[in-house]
Structure formats: structure tokens, C-alpha cells
């Protein structure tokens, strides 16, 4: 069976982008063990401006097959 990548769009009612990012962080912390979920590619956007997405994590590929888990635009080396 060939697997395809899919994107789940789940509208939320929250007071700000910061709350949306916090929710994605909480989801990653609780569901990060599920290999089918790629939280490194997570983005948030306003419902009425979905073409302008904000990436949450740096997600740079590290030499050992992992990805950087630090916030986008972090200082210092990836880890």
C-alpha cells in the first residue's frame, strides 16, 4: 500500500495567534509519539487569510535524521 501525505485543516476559535501556537505545542507534546503526525511542518493562519501561514518550528534537518524542535528564528544551534 502506498501512503500519501494529507493536511488536516481544523478551524479554531481562539483570541490570538499566540493561543493557536500554544495549542499546537500542547498537541505536539501529547501526540508527538504518533509517527503519522508531522508537527515539524505545523503552521497557523487566520481563517480569513489562510494563504499567509506562520511556521511554528525551525524544523531544520539534523544529521541523524531528526529535525530541529526549537521555535522558528531561534538563536544558537539547532537541536
Image (tube, rainbow, N blue to C red):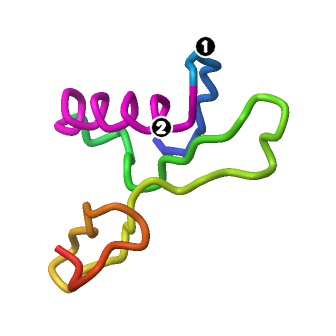
Q: Which label's residue is closer to the chain start, 1 or 2? A: 1
- Asked which secondary structure carries label 2, the reply is helix
Q: Nearer the viewer, residue 3 or 38?
A: 38
User: Crowding near pointer 1: few (<14 within 10 Å), some, many (20+)?
Assistant: few
Looking at the image, residue 73 sits to the left or right of residue 43; the answer is left
When the figure is inspected, residue 43 is found, relative to residue 61, above or below; the finding is: above
Q: Which residue is mark 1?
A: 13
Numbered circles on residues, count: 2
- Quadrant the C terminus occupies: bottom left
Identified at 32% across, 77% down, the residue is: 61
Identified at 76% across, 29% down, the residue is: 47
Label placed on residue 54: none
Which quarter of the figure has residue 27?
top left
**What secondary structure is the magenta-colored segment mainly?**
helix
Please provide the residue range marked out in magenta.
Answer: 16-33
Residue 58 placement (x, y as % from top left): 39, 68
Q: Which residue is mark 2?
A: 18
When the figure is inspected, residue 36 is found, relative to residue 38, above or below; the finding is: above
Distance of label 1 from label 2 (alpha carbons): 12 Å
Identified at 81% across, 49% down, the residue is: 51
Looking at the image, residue 49 sits to the left or right of residue 1; the answer is right
Looking at the image, residue 28 sits to the left or right of residue 33; the answer is right
Looking at the image, residue 18 sits to the left or right of residue 64; the answer is right
Residue 78 placement (x, y as % from top left): 23, 79
Amino acid at each position: 500500500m502506498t501512503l500519501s501525505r494529507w493536511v488536516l485543516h481544523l478551524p479554531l476559535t481562539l483570541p490570538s495567534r499566540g493561543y493557536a501556537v500554544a495549542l499546537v505545542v500542547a498537541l505536539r507534546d501529547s501526540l508527538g509519539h504518533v509517527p503519522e503526525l508531522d508537527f515539524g511542518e505545523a503552521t497557523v493562519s487566520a481563517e480569513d487569510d489562510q494563504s499567509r501561514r506562520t511556521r511554528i518550528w525551525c524544523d531544520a534537518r539534523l544529521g541523524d535524521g531528526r529535525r530541529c524542535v526549537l521555535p522558528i528564528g531561534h538563536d544558537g544551534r539547532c537541536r
